[in-house]
Every structure is written in C-alpha cells, then in structure tokens.
Amino acid sequence: MGGRQVRAARQLLAEALDGELPEHERVLAARTVIAELGSPARLLELTAELASGEGDPEGCARLSYRHVLGFDKLLLIDGGPHHMLRAHLWHAGRGAVGKEDIHNHRSPLASYVVRGQLTMELYAPEPDGGVEADRYQESLSDESADWLLEPAGPSRLRLTHVAQYAAGSTYALPAHTLHRAWTETAEPTVTLFLETGSGRRRHTDVFTAAGPHPGAVPKVPMRVEEYLRELDALAELLRSS
C-alpha cells in the first residue's frame, strides 16, 4: 500500500528494526535509519507523496494530533508494534501545558533535525540536591486516547547534559533516558521522529516543577482533511528550506 517513497520507507524501517535486537543495537539502528530518511530531499518526496493521499491517511490521521508539549505530531508510517515514523512540527512561540516537563519514553527513539534547531537537556535521579520535581506516571486510557497522569510523589533530578542540535543533526535515546527538548527559533522547527516498538513500557515517567497536572489530558486526533492539509503545508515548508 502506498507509492514508491512510502514502500521504500516501510522496507527500510522493517529491515532495520523488525528483528529482536538488544536495546543498544536498536538505538544505533534507529539513528542510522532516521538519518537516511531525514535527508531533506527524501523527506520532501515522502511527505508530498503522503499529502497526495498515498499510504494510510485515515489510519495516520487518527494517530496525529497537537501534542501537549507544544508541537504537532504527524504520523507518516505506522509500523504497528515495531516502529512509528512521525514528523514533529514545532511552531515558534506556541506554549502549552507541560512544555517544560522532563520525561522518558516507552521504547528507544531517534530523531533528525530537518529544519531549525532544538535544545536538549538530559537528567538523572538525584537523592540529595538537584532540582525538586513532582513525579507522575503517564499512560494511555483503555477507553480513549487520553493521556492519564497518576501522581507518584516528590523527586529530585540532576541535570547531566545540555546540547543544541542544528539542522542535519541526529540523536537517539534509550527508553528510560530522562530529557526535555524545546525550540527557541523564530521560524518553525521540523524534526523526523522514529519510535521503535520492541519491549514497549506500559507507562512513562513525567517530572514537573510547574505545579499539579490534571489527571487526564485529552488527545484530539486530526481529521483526515486536516491531516492532509498539514502534510501539504509541511511539504511546502520543506521546499522553501
């Protein structure tokens, strides 16, 4: 299903990630794949093909949304339990609930900065000293697509690393790595984000110093026409880069 670029992307992802790999090998494989798929020319061709209706627009629209961390998530390739390839579009000046939250993920990930710039901070638990934060366990509702946030008590974290990633940069993280990323550029930032699926955790850890979070945060899926319109706008943005 899909056009030439969709089929080629699916094949590349399957060959690299569908087998059983130790986490460190999966992280390296994900970083290699995301660098290949994230090259501006290839991503433009893939995005334009998807914007024309190739692939699975209905299924991908249901899993695309405006994220509470302040960016749009557009699902490009749904590899089921094995991997999901998304475009993240960070809009200048758009604030949101949870923007400053430190978190980890359910599985290893890799990202390629296609356009703009990201700042990344890494954290580790710190029994004494460090930054005070409230810890939550985040999961997905069985009845809906909402994020559920269950308080898990106070915590302290230590900042271990700060990095800036310009266009053309890649990074990859094991599932448990605590981090937060944001953009301060005046123009939109685009990243290609690869979430692997092997051994997915049931929940993630979220740490905030911004006060209590609501128990549930709605996840509103895009309509198909909205999803295709966003893909077309992304393709135009890539052409102008």
Image (cartoon, rainbow, N blue to C red):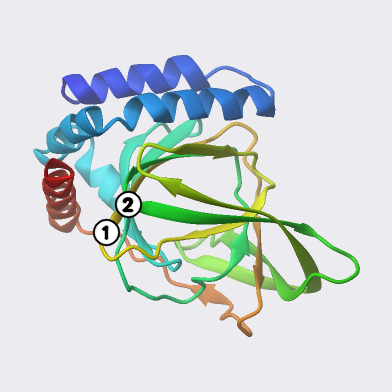
| Local secondary structure at mark 1 | loop
Label disc, if present, on residue 188 of the rendered structure: 1
Q: Is residue 8 above or below residue 77?
A: above
* CA separation in Å, label 2 and label 1: 7 Å
**Total marks placed:** 2
Q: According to the image, label 2 marks what residue?
A: 116
Q: Residue furthest bottom?
A: 211
Residue at left 54%, top 54%? Answer: 120
Left or right: 222, with 122 as reference point: left
- 70 w.r.t. 18: above or below: below
Query: Image quarter for residue 45?
Result: top left
Query: Which x, y percent locates residue 2?
Result: 19, 26
Question: Label 2 is placed on what type of residue?
Answer: Gly
Disc 2 secondary structure class: loop
Q: Residues within 10 Å of mark 1 (few under 14, many from 20)?
A: some
Residue 157 position (above or below residue 224): below
In this rendered view, identify the residue nearer to me: 209 or 117.
Answer: 117
Name the spot of residue 74 as percent of width and height, x first. Answer: 30, 49
| Of callouts 2 and 1, the N-terminal one | 2
Whether pointer 2 and pointer 1 mark residues with C-beta atoms closer than 8 Å, the reply is: yes
Q: Is residue 13 left or right of residue 210?
A: left
Is 102 left or right of 116, judged from the image as shown?
A: right
**Spot occupied by residue 19 in the image (x, y as percentages of width and height):** 56, 17
| Residue 194 visible from this viewpoint | no
